[in-house]
Amino acid sequence: MDEISEWKIFIEELISEIRMSPKGSDRERLAFIFVEEEMWDRLVALIRERRSIYTIREFEPQLLKHCPIELADLYGEGILQFMRFSVGRNYYQGACNYIKRLDKLGFPQKAMEIIGILRETYPFRTALIEELNKIRIALY
């Protein structure tokens, strides 16, 4: 067996071991392994499981370079998940900053889609609607 095959076997065993661990911090290690080993599909799947806007932001550079469409989808899912449990102007401003981030990264259509979903889902959150109204998306 060559060194590359041995390494791949070792990595897969390590991934299996980490997946069985109940510790949240071990999930972070798993994400870093996926980055180092350039396992982009697996990184996307792991981030999608967690649905954490903060994790998406942490791995944004790698995702933007290797799987930009998935990054836009993850941000969309993450923003919607964030808003399910977040109430208050500070949280709304945070969500709007991520929507602006989507636009800045080159995904204005996805940003507009998320704005539309939030308007439809939370029409009575007046502070949210006010913050959404402040966003200016540059549609080209």
Image (cartoon, helix red, strand yellow):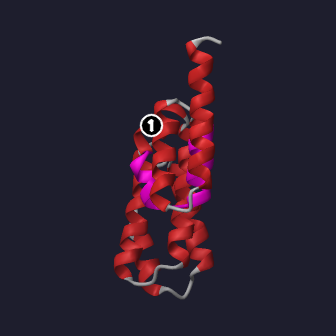
Image position, residue 112 (x, y; %): 54, 58
Above or below: residue 62 compared with residue 2: below
For the point 61% across and 69% down, the residue is: 117
Q: Residue furthest top?
A: 2
For the point 43% across and 45% down, the residue is: 59
Above or below: residue 106 compared with residue 131: above
For the point 56% across and 72% down, the residue is: 118
Disc 1 crowd rating (10 Å Cα; few below 14, some 14-19, many 20+) is: some
Q: Secondary structure at mark 1?
A: helix
Above or below: residue 71 compared with residue 24: above
Quadrant of the frame with the N terminus: top right
- Where does the magenta region start and end? 41-59
Image position, residue 129 (x, y; %): 47, 78
Image position, residue 99 (x, y; %): 45, 59
Res 73 visible = no
Q: Is residue 48 magenta?
A: yes
Image position, residue 111 (x, y; %): 51, 56
In front here: 119 or 66? 66
Dividing the picture into quadrants, the one containing residue 130 is bottom left
Q: Amino acid at mark 1?
A: Gln
Q: Residue furthest front?
A: 1
Residue that label 1 marks? 62
For the point 56% across and 62% down, the residue is: 22
